[in-house]
Image (cartoon, rainbow, N blue to C red):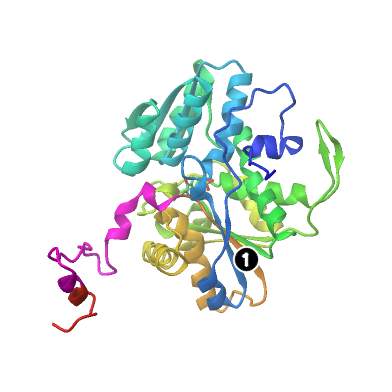
C-alpha cells in the first residue's frame, strides 16, 4: 500500500523533541514537492529545484513550525496562544489552534498584510488585533504578553518552531539523496534560515535521538546557505536593525530579526551570504516563476529566486551544481501582483462576444 504522508512530527519523530505519549497537533504539513525548475536550470547550467512550501495546509512553510509549537502548547496545558505576524504565521497559528481546540490571538501590523492571509486568520476564528506599528512592534508586544499573561507564544523565537521547520532540510536530502551544493531562501525574521541550517547539520552527523538511540548520518555534506532580504528591509546587509523597513514583499518586511545570531552563524559556518534584492527584482522573479516554471508564489517567496538570478548575472553562480531554493508561500495569498503588467498597469481580460468565429479571430486563428 502506498505510504500516506503523516505530517512532519510523525514522519521525523525520532529527530524531534516528542515521545510516543505526545499528543500531536497536525494538519498533514510537510511532504511538499521538490520541483525541478527547468528554466532556472537552463539559465544557470546547474540543477535548480524549488521546494514549494505553498503546498502546506495553510499555504506557507510556517505550518512545519506550527505543528510543533501547537503540540508544545497543548503539552504545556496552554488555553490560548499568541503570535505576531506579517500574515502567514497568523494564518498558520489560527488553523493549528483550531485543530488543537485553543484560543488564538494574532497581532498584525496595520495596513501591510495581504487579504488572503487576513481572511485565513479570521476564517479560523482567531482574535485579530491590528497594531498601530510594524511587525517588530507586534513581536515585542507578543513576547511581553507571553511573559506576563497566560498565553503561549508561537512565534519562531519559540524553539519548537525551529525544530519543526528544520524538517524542510530533511525532506530535501531524503529526496535528492544528499544535501544540495547551495540552499537559497528569503530571509525575514530569520527563523527559516536558522532552521534549515540546523536540519542540514543534524542530517550530516550522527544524531543522539531522545527516543531511538544514535542515528547514523544521512548526508555526506551540508550546503552553502544563500539568504536574500528585500533591499528596503535588509538589516543583515546593513549590519544593524532597520527602524522603518519597507518593501512590497510583506512576508519579509522585518527590520529587527529575532533569530539574528543563528542566521549569521548559518551564513558564516556554511560559507554563504545574506544579500539584498530590490522590489523590482523580486517582482521580476515572481513573474519568472509563474510564467516560466508554472509555480505561483507570493512576492516575498520569490526573493530567493531573485537572488539567484541576480548572482547569475554577476557571474557568481557556478554551473554543474545542485541548487535548492525554498519558495516559501503560495501565490494565492497575495494574488493582486499577478494582475499587473511590468509597467504597473492592470491586466484586463479581452472581452469577446458569445460566438466561436469571434473567439477564433481574437486568437488569430481566423482572418478578420
Ligand atoms: C515568514 C515568511 C518568510 C520569512 O521567513 P523567516 O523565517 O521570517 O526568515 C518568507 N516568506 C514567507 C512567505 C513567509 O511567510
Quarter of the figure with the N terminus: top right
Q: Residue 228 placed where, x, y %? A: 52, 59
Q: Is residue 288 above or below residue 117?
A: below
In the rendered structure, which segment of residues is drawn in magenta? 330-359
- What residue sits right under mark 1 in the picture? 323
Which of the image's four quarters has the C terminus? bottom left
In front: 143, or 184?
184
Q: Position of residue 92 (x, y in %)?
A: 47, 35
Question: Is 310 or 9 nearer to us in this picture?
Answer: 9
x, y percent for residue 362: 19, 74
Q: Horizontally, is 177 left or right of 82 in the view?
A: right
> Is 34 situated left or right of 151 in this image?
right
Q: Secondary structure at mark 1?
A: strand
Spot occupied by residue 263 in the image (x, y as percentages of width and height): 61, 50
- Taking the image as drawn, is residue 113 in sight? no
Q: Is residue 242 above or below residue 293?
A: above
**x 43%, y 60%: residue:** 231
Main SS, magenta region, reads: loop
Q: Does residue 97 appear to the left or right of 286 in the view shown? A: right
Amino acid at each position: 500500500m502506498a505510504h500516506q504522508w503523516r505530517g512532519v512530527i510523525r514522519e521525523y519523530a525520532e529527530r524531534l523533541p516528542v515521545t510516543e505519549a505526545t499528543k500531536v497537533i497536525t494538519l498533514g504539513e510537510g511532504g511538499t514537492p521538490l520541483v525541478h525548475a527547468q528554466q532556472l536550470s537552463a539559465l544557470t547550467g546547474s540543477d535548480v529545484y524549488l521546494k514549494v512550501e505553498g503546498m502546506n495546509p495553510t499555504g506557507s512553510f510556517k505550518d512545519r513550525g506550527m505543528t510543533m509549537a501547537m503540540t508544545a502548547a497543548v503539552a504545556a496545558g496552554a488555553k490560548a496562544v499568541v503570535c505576531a505576524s506579517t500574515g502567514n504565521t497568523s494564518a498558520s497559528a489560527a488553523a493549528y489552534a483550531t485543530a488543537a481546540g485553543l484560543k488564538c490571538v494574532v497581532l498584525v501590523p496595520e495596513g501591510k498584510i495581504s487579504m488572503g492571509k487576513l481572511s485565513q486568520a479570521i476564517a479560523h476564528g482567531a482574535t485579530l488585533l491590528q497594531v498601530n506599528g510594524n511587525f517588530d512592534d507586534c513581536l515585542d508586544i507578543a513576547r511581553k504578553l507571553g511573559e506576563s499573561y497566560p498565553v503561549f507564544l508561537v512565534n519562531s523565537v519559540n524553539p519548537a518552531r525551529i525544530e519543526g521547520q528544520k524538517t524542510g532540510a530533511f525532506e530535501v536530502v531524503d529526496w535528492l539523496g544528499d544535501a544540495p551544493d547551495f540552499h537559497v531562501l528569503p530571509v525575514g525574521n530569520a527563523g527559516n534560515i536558522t532552521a534549515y541550517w540546523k536540519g542540514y547539520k543534524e542530517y550530516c552527523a550522527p544524531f543522539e535521538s531522545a527516543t531511538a538511540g544514535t542515528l547514523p548520518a544521512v548526508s555526506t555534506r551540508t550546503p552553502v546557505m544563500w539568504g536574500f532580504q528585500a533591499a528596503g528591509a535588509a538589516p543583515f546587509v546593513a549590519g544593524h536593525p532597520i527602524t522603518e523597513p519597507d518593501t512590497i514583499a510583506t512576508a519579509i518586511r522585518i527590520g529587527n530579526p529575532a533569530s539574528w545570531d543563528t542566521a549569521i552563524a548559518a551564513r558564516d559556518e556554511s560559507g554563504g551570504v545574506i544579500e539584498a534584492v530590490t522590489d523590482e527584482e523580486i517582482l521580476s522573479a515572481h513573474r519568472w516563476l509563474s510564467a516560466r516554471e508554472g509555480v505561483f508564489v507570493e512576492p516575498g517567496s520569490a526573493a530567493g529566486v531573485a537572488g539567484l538570478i541576480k548572482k547569475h548575472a554577476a557571474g557568481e553562480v557556478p554551473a554543474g551544481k545542485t541548487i535548492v531554493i525554498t519558495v516559501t508561500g503560495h501565490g494565492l495569498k497575495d494574488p493582486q501582483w499577478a494582475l499587473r503588467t511590468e509597467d504597473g498597469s492592470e491586466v484586463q481580460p479581452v472581452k469577446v462576444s458569445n460566438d466561436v468565429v469571434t473567439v477564433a479571430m481574437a486568437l488569430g486563428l481566423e482572418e478578420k
